[in-house]
Amino acid sequence: MKQFPTDFLWGGAIAANQVEGAWREDGKGISTSDVQPQGIFGEVDERKTDRFSLKDIAIDFYHRYPEDIALFSEMGFGILRVSIAWTRIFPKGDESTPCEAGLAYYDKLFDELAKHGIKAMVTLSHYEMPWHLVTEYGGWSNREVIAFFERYAKVVFKRYAEKVKWWLTFNEINMSLHAPLTGVGLRAGCRESDVYQAIHHQLVASALAVRACHLIIPDAKIGNMLLGGLVYPLSCQPNDVLATLQENRKWLFFGDVQCRGAYPGYMLRYFRDQGIDVVITEEDKHILKQTVDFISFSYYMTGCVTADEALNKQSRGNILNMVPNPHLSASEWGWQIDPVGLRTLLNVLWDRYRKPLFIVENGLGAKDCPDEQGQLNDDYRINYMNDHLVQVREAIEDGVEVLGYTSWGPIDLISASKAEISKRYGFIYVDRHDDGSGTLVRMKKKSFFWYQDVIRTQGACLK
Ligand code: BGP
C-alpha cells in the first residue's frame, strides 16, 4: 500500500490576524489587517474605530489558545503553523526596542505547543504589517522598510531560537499582485511599477531573513510561502498555451527568485516590455543569493487561461481572475475544486526547484450548521480533504519530497478575503457569527474524528 513517510508532519495552519483578536491588548499596534474590516480586498477604514470588525475579537485565540491547542493535540497534530503579529513586537514598526509583552505572549504560546509535543512553524508576516509603516513610509515601496523587517526578524529568531525550528518569511508573497495593500502596503490605484519595486524590496527582506535565520538558529529551516496559483490552458490553441505559461510565471517568478537566487530572464523582459523600472542594486543581487531551505505553498483551486480577451473579460470571476474550468465543480465561494491539480502542482514545483515541499494551507470553506442534535456532519469537507491527500500520496509515489501538510483553519476562523466567519474551514466549530454574536464555544465536527484517524493511521485510512 502507498504510504506517507513516517516522519511526515501532520497539522494545521492559522494566522494571527484571523484568530487572535485582542487587537489592542498588551501594547499591540495597528496593522494593515486592522484597518481592513472587510478583508484583504476591502476598503480602508483609517480611523479604525468607525466600523465593527469581526477580527477585533476573532475567535479569541489570544486568550483561549490552551484549550485550542489541547484539541489540536487530541487530533494528533505534530506541527501547528501560526504567525507572529509584527505589531505585537514592534507596534509601529520603526521602534528600536521591541515590546516585551508581545514577545512574552508568543513565549507562552510556543511553550504550550511544546507541552503537547507539537512543533511550531512560524510565518513572520502573514497578511499584515504595521499601519504606521504604510502612512509614514509608503509601505514596502520604501527601502527603509527592509531594515525594519530585518530587525523584527532578528529579534524573534533570537528570542525563540530554542522553541521554533520552522520558519516562513512572507505569506503568499505573490498575492501582492492582487491585494497590494495587504501584501506590500500600497494603496489602491498604485502603479504596477510601484508594486514590483515594493515586491523587490520584500524579496530582499526575505533573503535577509533567510541569512539571519541560518546564522542565529543553524538547526532551523526557513522557507518561502507561495500561493500555488496553478492555471491550465482553456484550450490547446498555442496562444492559450503560451498565455498560460506567462500566467504561471507571474507567481512562479517569486519562487524563482527565492529558490534560485536571481531574477529570471522572462521577468526582466516583462519589465522592459511594460516600461517597469525596478531599482535592483548590486548588493541586492548578492543578498538574493540566500535561497530558502524548502518551499511552502497554499493550494485551494486551479483555473484556466485563454488568450481570447473577450472571453477573458466575461468569464473572470474568482479572486485571482481565472477563467473557470468547465470540467470542475466549485465551492460555495466559487473556488474550483481540483485534487489532481495538487499532484500536478507538487510535481511542477519539485521538477523546477528540487527543494523539499511543504503544503501549509489546503481546505474547504463551507457554511457549516449544527443539526437538530447539535451534530456537525461535514462530509463535504472530509471528501475534499480525502481526495486532496490521496493526490499528495500519489505525488510522493512520483518521487516528490513532501515534508508535511498543515490544513488551513483546523479551527473556524475569520476569512481573509471576506472577513466573515460563515466561511468555515475548521475541524472544530466556533460558535460565532458574522454579526458578532455567539458564545465562542468550541465543538468538534465529524471531520475532527476523521482527521484524527488520518494522522493516527499515517494516511492508511484514506480512500
Ligand atoms: C490564503 C491565506 C489565508 C486564508 C486562506 C483562505 O490565501 O493565506 O490567510 O485565509 O487563503 O482564504 P479565505 O479566508 O479568504 O477563505
Image: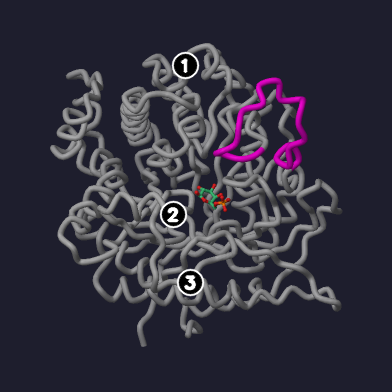
Position of residue 332 in the picture relative to residue 25 (left or right): left
Image point 49% across, 48% down: which residue? Answer: 121
- Which label number is shown at residue 448? none
Image point 20% across, 66% down: which residue? Answer: 236
Can I make out residue 262 in this image?
Answer: no
Whether the residues at callouts 3 and 1 have beta carbons within 8 Å, the answer is no
Can I make out residue 414 in this image?
Answer: yes
Nearer the camera: disc 3 or disc 1: 3
Task: Residue 263: give x, y in percent of width and height.
Answer: 19, 34
User: Residue 104 colored magenta?
Assistant: no
Nearer the camera: disc 3 or disc 2: 3
- Disc with the residue nearer the chain's start (3 vs 1): 1
- The residue pinned by badge 2 equals 298
User: Residue 52 colored magenta?
Assistant: yes
Position of residue 107 in the picture relative to residue 316 (left or right): right
Amino acid at circle 3 = Ser
Q: CA distance from mark 3 to mark 1?
A: 41 Å
Nearer the camera: disc 1 or disc 2: 1
Amino acid at circle 1 = Gly
Secondary structure beneath label 2: strand
Task: Residue 392: give x, y in percent of width and height.
Answer: 38, 71
- The residue pinned by badge 3 equals 329
Which region is colored magenta? 38-57
Specify few, some or many for label 2: CA neighbours under 10 Å numbering under 14, 14-19, or 20 or more: many
Work out which residue is located at the far front of the displayed protein and give it: 310
- The residue pinned by badge 1 equals 138
Work out which residue is located at the far bottom of the displayed protein and give it: 1
Q: CA distance from mark 1 to mark 2?
A: 28 Å
The one of 226 and 49 positioned closer to us in this rendering: 49
